[in-house]
Amino acid sequence: MLMTDLPVLTLNEFFAALTHPSALVEAATLLACLGVAWLAVRLLRGPTAEAGSVWFGRNIIDGVLFPVLALALAYAARTLLHRFGVPLAVFKIVIPVLLSLAVIRLSVRVLRAAFPDSRLVRVAERTISWLAWATMVSWTTGVLPQILDELDQIQWKMGNSHVSVRTLLEGALSAGFVLMLSLWVSSAIEARLLKGASGGQLSLRKAAANAVRALLTFVGLLLALSAVGIDLTALSVLGGAIGVGVGLGLQKLAANYVSGFVILAERSLRIGDTVRVDNFEGRITDIATRYTVIRALNGREAIVPNEMLITQRVENSSLADPRVLVSTLVQVGYDTDVDSLMPQICDEVAKVARVLPDPGPSVQLSNFAADGLELTINFWIIDPENGLGSVRSEVNLAVWRLLKRLKVEIPFPQRVLRVEGPALPSPADQLKSASSSTL
């Protein structure tokens, strides 16, 4: 360990060492170590670093590489100074500080790379930072070694071995470190797999990335359990219990995970496809192992469980052909020459920017309506993710301008009004009543 071999000094001894002339030597050596680490990271990083890099971060000093190099150089310098009999005071603080900084940078960068959209990452960052700095301060002041000695006295027998609270704490830290490394490796592999991929290739690489992350997390979990001191041969009984739990309480969760891998393997749904499921239509933006994110044209997003995409009917507008047929209606009067009007409508609709020329627009006489002849205008587009309402509006405006230019009547609704009341007398009855009144 980097801190356990450091002598724990009392406060008087510590302040006496700080006022010793050798403290200036330590400070100069520390500045040299930090300068060499900064220069090495600068040369390795180059003018620009990859966004979200765990090693380099956004700047030179906020990645993992700088505190690790500085820690290694400071530890080597401390060893040399100790061999020459120089009393250590500065390095007694520097080594724990650099170690805490390296742990914080590693955890923060790995968590951000593995879970970029999670809100719990910031909470985990603060928790790890507080724990790391508290450990550093307690070790520097000599409190932590005493606490560890007391915790080592609390023991009990687990199977054939004796376990103490200190052993569990050290095993938990080792387990966290192993899981952090597995997340780091899986996120790096996922970034490499998804780089430059699109469409069906993106979905296939996403499936491979999810499988790699699950495998590495499982291996990391086994190593973490071994580090804590749990006998892995007991996992056979635990596996049976987990199987019963999956069959009962975790059935839906397991079904969603399995459905996610089936979707990614079969490539029936791909990132970028326009689908309609459960009366919600939108574009697939992400396919995770448990759910799929569908973004509607109005900006709303739906998180759909993968099991629903397997067991229910899903309309995929982009599976075999990305082209989508769009229709609109218009009515003209019965005295209109539709034989000459229909080709002109096709030519006018073809001028709209988003309308495909092949297959071109078509017009059909679809119905003899009560007020006029009903014409159905069909046209194809290839970008339904940009919305259907805008292109339909442009087509309607183009048709309306054409009809206005040709002075073609768009008939208004016609209604027959019948007024019911008492019957009026006929003209003959009116003459008879007039003659009788004269006499």
Image: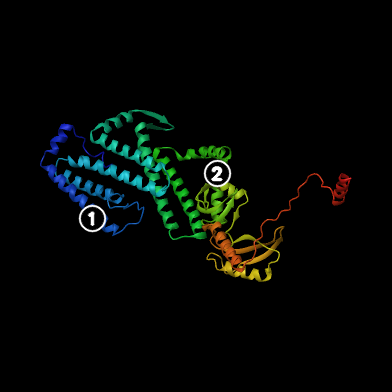
Mark 2 or mark 1: whose residue is earlier in sequence: 1
Q: Residues within 10 Å of mark 1 (few under 14, many from 20)?
A: some
Give whichever of 117, 356 is nearer the camera.
356
Rendered residue at 41%/29% (across/down): 157
The kind of residue tagged 2 is Ala
Q: Position of residue 367 (x, y in %)?
A: 71, 60
Q: CA distance from mark 2 to mark 1?
A: 50 Å
State left or right for residue 21 relative to residue 390: left
Q: Is 68 displayed left or right of 247 in the figure?
A: left
> What residue would you read off at disc 1?
39
Instruction: Report the front residue among 260 and 181.
Output: 260
Residue 254 - label: 2
Badge 2 crowding class, 10 Å Cα cut-off, few under 14, some 14 to 19, many 20 or more, is: some
Check disc 2 and report its element: helix, strand or loop.
Answer: helix
* Image quarter of residue 252: top right
Q: x, y (%) of residue 249?
A: 56, 37
Give the x, y percent position of residue 13.
15, 34
| Amino acid type of the residue that numbered disc 1 sits on in the rendered structure | Leu
